[in-house]
Image (spheres, helix red, strand yellow):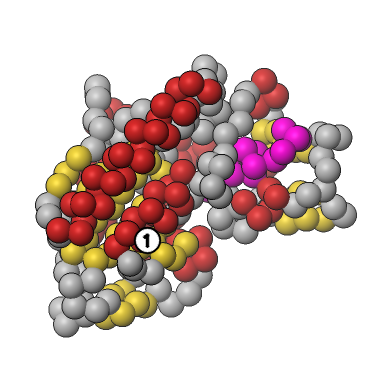
Amino acid sequence: MIFYFSGTGNSKWVAEQIASCQKTKLMPIGDEINTSCSYHLEPGELLGFVFPVYSWGPPQIVLDFIDKVKVDTLDGRPDYLFFACTCGDDVGYTDRVMKSAFERKGWRLDSCFSVQMPNTYVLLPFFDVDSHDLEQSKLRKAVKKVARINTILGARSNSFALLVTSVPWIKTYLIRPLFNLSLKKVDSKYWVTDDCIECGLCAKACPVHNVEMKNGKPAWKCDGSCVGCLGCYHRCPKHAIQNGKITLKRGQYYHKQN
C-alpha cells in the first residue's frame, strides 16, 4: 500500500510507477487524511510514502497523516516500510525527520530513496523552474532511478539512498521551520489575471481541495489548508494565477502524465 502527496505531479508519477510494479494500492494523502486513516495490510505487504521535499524536509501534511495512520497487522507494524521523496536538488535531513515520525509509532524504516525531478518552487528570489534541457535530463534519469527502486522494493532489500549535500542540519532544522511558517499565509497572496479562461484546472490540481471556482474564477479558502504546493499556479494553462508579484516572471512546470 502506497500513500502519496503531490502538487505538480512529480511525486504522483513516482508513486504510480512504484505501485504499478509492486502491484499494490495507491492512495492520495490529501483525501485520506480526512478519513479514519485505518488500513489493513496483508502479511508481507509493503507500506510506502511518496512525497516532494519542501525546504529540505517532508511536507507537514505527510507528517500529520503518518501520525494518524493505523495499520491492521498482527503487531500493528508494517512488514516492510519505505519512503521515496522527490527533490529539485538535495533533501537535507529528510530521513531523520521521517525516521522520528515512524519511531513515534514504533515502526522501523527499511528503505528510503530520493528521486531528483524538475524544480517547482518559485516563490523566493532567484528560485525558478529548470531550463527545458535540465528538466528533460532529470526526467530521463528519474525513469532509471525508479526502476532501481522497484528492484530493491521487489526484493524487500534494505537501502538508504538519499541525495544529501552541504549543511543539511541547517537546511532542515533552521531554514525549514521558517519556511513552514511562511506557508500559513501563502494562499492569501494568490490572485488571477484577466487571462483566466475559467477552465477549472487549478481547482482540480489542488491536492487538498483548497481552490474553489466562484463565478468561473478560482478562489482560495484561506482557512489554513493550503500546503504551498503551487499546483494551482503551475497547472494554469494561461499563467493567469499569480502569487504576489514574484511569479509574474517565473516559469511553470507540471508533469505531463498528470
Q: Position of residue 72 (x, y in %)?
A: 27, 80
Magenta stretch in the rendered image: 227-240
Left-right relation of 193 to 51: right
Q: Would you name the residue on which mark 1 appears? A: 20
231 is higher (above) or lower (below) than 76 = above
Left-right relation of 107 to 141: left
201 is higher (above) or lower (below) than 156 = above
Look at 53% across and 23% down and name the residue there: 132
Q: Between residue 3 and residue 14, name the one nearer to us.
A: 14
219 is higher (above) or lower (below) than 24 = above
Instruction: Check disc 1 and report its element: helix, strand or loop.
Output: helix
Q: Position of residue 67 (x, y in %)?
A: 33, 64
Look at 31% across and 35% down and name the residue there: 91
Does 69 appear in magenta? no
Question: In the image, what residue type sits under mark 1?
Answer: Ser
Q: Position of residue 20 (x, y in %)?
A: 37, 61
Q: What's the magenta bit mostly, secondary-structure-wise?
A: loop
